[in-house]
Image (tube, rainbow, N blue to C red):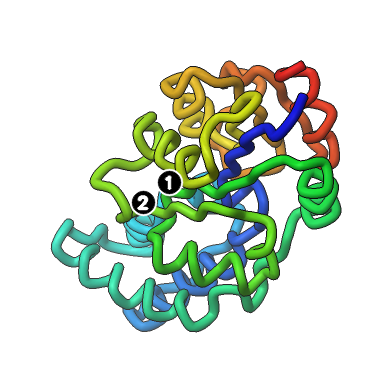
Amino acid sequence: MTTPALVFDLDGTLVDTAPDLLGALNAVLRAEGRRAVNLADLRHLVGHGARAMLDEAMKRTGEPADAARIEGLMDDFIAHYRTHIAAESRLFPGVKETLEKLQAEGARMGVLSNKPQELTSMLIPAVDLSRFFCAIHGAGRLEVVKPNARVFHHVIEEMGGEGSGMVMIGDSATDVKTARAAGCPSIVLTYGYSPEPVETLGADRVTDDFRDIPRLVRELLG
């Protein structure tokens, strides 16, 4: 196996961003005179984006907000998150050393996230991961997002093409659907933000340890 092309999800796969997302959410709630919510309440929504988190948080803390109000709150949420993007976010165990190993073995790696491009591009250097990735793609670069296969292949092209094989590595049903649409295998981490048990998502491999990735890639690509 030579030069595999590995595409990683970001939130819930490489970085535990939930604490800073929750911080931004609670800043918005406090400004609205609402009580704070805790991570257990909303962790399952992190992977579905800020709008879903805001909508659910408003319902849990008082009167629901209509769509127009949610749009306004989104601006406040993003403004706070932008200035605290890596205050408490941390790499999941084994991420940095595993990326170093994969890079040393010649793997080409990219990031494909449905997080807005601006925030994706801010977060990766903030957690010292920039040197590992030759393509970084967040929402907004194309008019479609995961699980549309176009965004996956766009990342692959930026990485220099398929090489000896492609693998999508993530934590959610969206990542598995992306891989399926793109015609490549998927690996799913159990520790992420999926509301469903990851064993039910149909991934080709499932693991609770990021350090298993090199071995699982070898199994999938030969």
Question: Residue 74, how many percent across, how many down?
Answer: 30, 68
Give the label, 1 or 2, closer to the camera: 1
Which image quadrant is residue 129 in?
bottom right
Quarter of the N terminus within the rendering: top right
Number of residue marks: 2
* Circle 2 SS class: helix
Query: In the visual, does 99 lie left or right of 141?
Result: right
Q: Of the residues shown, which amino acid type is indicated by label 2?
A: Ala
Which image quadrant is residue 199 in?
top right
Tell me if residue 188 can be seen.
yes
Q: Which residue corresponds to mark 2?
A: 52
* Circle 1 SS class: helix
Question: Residue 23, how many percent across, how many down?
Answer: 53, 73
Q: Nearer the viewer, residue 26 or 11?
A: 11
Q: Of the residues shown, which amino acid type is indicated by label 1?
A: His
Pointers 1 and 2 in contact (CB under 8 A)? yes
What is the residue that sits farthest to the left in this orientation? 68
Which image quadrant is residue 97 in?
bottom right
Tell me if residue 53 can be seen.
no
Q: Residues within 10 Å of mark 2 (few under 14, many from 20)?
A: some
Q: Residue at x 62, y 54 (%)?
A: 133
Q: Nearer the viewer, residue 179 or 20?
A: 179
Determine whether 83 is above or below 108 in the image. below
Determine whether 104 is above or below 212 in the image. below
Question: Residue 173, how many percent across, how many down?
Answer: 50, 29
Q: Which residue corresponds to mark 1?
A: 48
